[in-house]
Image (tube, grey):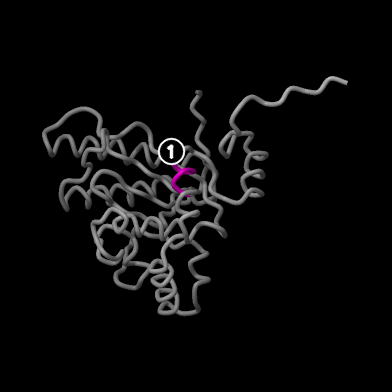
Amino acid sequence: MARLPRLTLAGQPHHVIQRGNNRQAIFLDRADREMFLGLLGENAVRFGIALHAYVLMENHFHLLATPSTADGLPQWMQSVGRRYVRYFNDRHGRSGTLWEGRYKSTLIQTDRYLFACMAYIDLNPVRAGMVDEAREHPWSSHAHYAGLAHDRLLTPHPLYWTLGNTPFAREAAYAEMVRAGVPAAAQALLTDATLHGWAAGDPDFVDSLQKTTGRRTSKARAGRPPLPRTP
């Protein structure tokens, strides 16, 4: 099956996943994680990326970001990926690839799935059994939005400001949203859409994207298309 071209649009949030080759560790210690986050921030400025959320796991990472240009996201990921691999290989005396192929991504319908995606990212360490609560994982954006720390890498999406009229109200509402968890259907949609390069949204949003981009934005129906009826 032919590989779909990336679905990337300026001004729209995208969920990104990148895994280590053969699921190997891509971060071995604090220095590795700090270097990676530094590269994310440096190159976000360079390529016009607003980074909204992230989580660093042992063998993969998740990002939620909005590019200001159609080419910004792939340029950002390519630059960060190449520079980090050079750093990682030099520091740890290894050679060869670090990533499991190219990164996976999906375009997010803002009003329907932005907050679900942020909570999905925050809760990744909880689902993996690494921590009991999202606030316990030190390498994610959760602390920033829950009012526990300030993270200069982050640019809150405009929708975040609708959570409350004061910082305290927004932080409390966000923390409660994450504690409530992500519905199973939304979690499955976000996972499948990201891994397969589809759009994460309702049918109208997905259909509109397909008409705009001319690219398939959802799972194709099984089987051959029906033959036209003869008169």
Q: Name the residue under label 1.
A: 74
Vertical side of 146 occupied by 59: above or below: above
- Magenta stretch encompasses residue 192: yes
Q: Which amino acid does label 1 sit on?
A: Pro
Rendered location of residue 86, percent (x, y): 22, 35
Magenta: main secondary structure equals helix
The foreground one among 37 and 194 is 194
Of 166 and 126, nearer the camera is 126
Q: Where is residue 18 in the image (x, y as percent from the top left)?
A: 34, 41
- Quick check: 200 above or below 83? below
| SS class, disc 1 | helix
The image position of residue 161, as x and y in percent, is 50, 70
Which stretch is magenta? 190-195
Q: Position of residue 195 (x, y in %)?
A: 43, 40
Tell me which residue sits at (50%, 51%) in the image. Answer: 13
Farthest residue toward the right?
231
